[in-house]
Amino acid sequence: MKKICLTFDDGVESHYWAKNLLKDNGLKGTFFITNASLWHHGDKVIELGMNEDRIDFDLLAEFENDGFEIGSHTFSHPNLTEISSDHIVTEICSMNCILQNYGIKNLRSFCYPAYNVDQRVFDIVKQIGFKNARTGYEDRDHGWSRWDFKKPPEEPRPKTTYPTKPEQNRLLIRPKGIFNFIYKYEDFLDDFDSMTDNEVAVFVFHGLKEASLKKDFEKVVSFLKDKKDAESINFGDI
Ligand SMILES: [Zn+2]
């Protein structure tokens, strides 16, 4: 059985729509929430089609009640490799606190903002006690790199040191595909076909307000809902 883990970064309004679509089709997913509003200002983000507000935190408990997972994506989405250790702890713990105050009970997964992680960040995330954490591709945010849970990637992102013990790579889980305007539904199908039996593959989505991204997501959902050889899982269950 292939295991498919759909993850959603940055906690934006369209993720509520995504959650309900997944729910209606019997699928799962993990949503990484930040207090920052990343996608509602500036020409560049409008061009990217992600011009939308942060999700209403009052809705988050409903995600968990519906069987989805809420994970932390820090308070203000900084590059954690560029701030002090105390500041990293504050960024993570304050977001954990907020999520818990909004009724999140099962907080066990973390996502590095903009995929930036190094040994120091890794050690803090481990010490805080997250079970699983997700980063990005080896060296860039798009393309067709592959995630291998057991061995360190051949081309690490700059400044990243990977643990030699495979189980520690739970805190450096890489996506197999990051949906954007380059990586689309067809790429997802290629990735799905290339998966071996029992392989776990993580896929990343951001805002889904833009029509083409929304359409691709709907195609993914309708492809997965009837798959007999694939199971949809939350990130924390990897
Ligand atoms: Zn993010």
Image: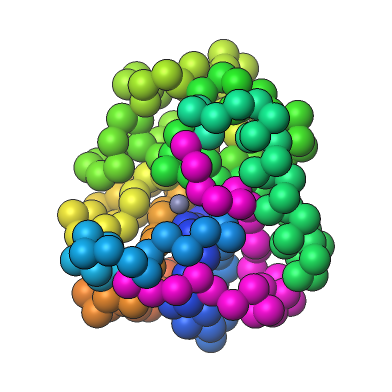
* Left or right of 7 on screen, residue 168: right
Q: Residue at x 77, y 37 (%)?
A: 129
Q: Residue furthest top?
A: 164
Count the marks: 0
Q: In this view, does 227 lie above or below 2?
A: below
| Any part of residue 220 in sight | no
Q: In this view, does 8 lie above or below 141?
A: below
* Left or right of 230 on screen, residue 157: left
What stretch of residues is rendered in magenta? 51-79
Nearest to the observer: residue 62 or residue 12: 12
Residue 166 picture location, percent across and down: 59, 23
Q: In this view, does 118 lie above or below 185?
A: above
Nearest to the observer: residue 79 or residue 232: 79
Rendered image quadrant of residue 39: bottom left
Q: Which residue is drawn at 24% across and 79% down?
A: 211
Q: Residue at x 31, y 30 (%)?
A: 139
Residue 229 picture location, percent across and down: 46, 61
Nearest to the observer: residue 120 or residue 40: 40
| Any part of residue 130 in sight | yes
Nearest to the observer: residue 185 or residue 227: 185
Residue 103 picture location, percent across and down: 79, 70
Q: Which residue is drawn at 49% across and 17% down?
A: 161
- Indicate yes or no whether the magenta region holds residue 180: no
Colour setting:
rainbow
* Left or right of 69 on screen, residue 226: left
Rendered image quadrant of residue 62: bottom right
Residue 217 picture location, percent across and down: 34, 72
* Left or right of 134 on screen, residue 181: left
